[in-house]
Image (cartoon, rainbow, N blue to C red):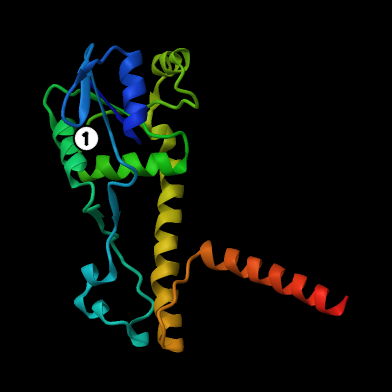
Amino acid sequence: MKLIVTEKPSVAKSIATVINAKTKKDGYYEGNDYLVSWCIGHLLGLAEPSTYDEKYTKWRKEDLPILPDNWKYLPNPNAKKQLNVLMELIKRNDIQTIINAGDSGREGELIFRLVYEHAKSKKPVQRLWISSLEESAVKEGLANLRPGADYDKLYKAALCRNQSDWIVGMNFSRLFSINYNTKLNVGRVQTPTLAMVVERHDSATRSLTTA
């Protein structure tokens, strides 16, 4: 028996239809020697600073920067039911292989890997890498599965992005909020992008006033 894990319920339904896994269960499809289940986006996310140390409950400049030695991921409280479904399926004795059918990209890799690691599973993983849910594309992808380890670097790149967002967001949001005595949200991508918008607006305004 093989377990296919997708990133979205709609993708799971499409793949289940192609492979004839038509029996609908609570949180997955079953049939033709397959189980097909899904994540709902990120089922696990990075823990808040206070999870590492209670002192981080208060925002103080002397505690910055916050740089975890061992990153902690916690279940999304809005998706615990589906996470529990996946934990049970991954640990089932009749599941011999797990197929990562997350979206073909960095984020899809991260979403699956966090769930797999949360389950502390050692079962072999194969990767389904497709860009279409057409029947022919799904069948071709399943016929040409690659070892999950082939995508380890993609997973590490996703972790770097994920954790760097946390480091910048948590530390600079606290720093600027403390300095300016008001709550400010600073993000690795959000803030420079906003700065570009402001600079463009200011440039346009200057052009109008000097015309």
Q: Residue furthest left?
A: 93
- Residue at point 59%, 63% (across, down): 193
Q: Is residue 55 depicted above or below 105 in this figure? A: below
Q: Specify whether 85 is left or right of 199.
A: left
- Can residue 1 be seen? no
Residue 155 image point, x, y percent: 41, 44
Q: Is residue 189 depicted above or below 34 in this figure? A: below
Q: Specify whether 136 is left or right of 64.
A: right
Which image quarter is the C terminus in? bottom right
Residue 91 image point, x, y percent: 14, 33
- Residue at point 30%, 54% (across, down): 45
Q: Specify whether 73 is left or right of 15.
A: left
Secondary structure beneath dot 1 equals: loop
Q: Residue furthest right?
A: 211
Q: Which residue carries the number 1 mark?
A: 122
Residue 14 image point, x, y percent: 36, 22
Q: Is residue 104 depicted above or below 25 in this figure? A: below
- Residue type for callout 1: Lys
Residue 26 image point, x, y percent: 16, 30
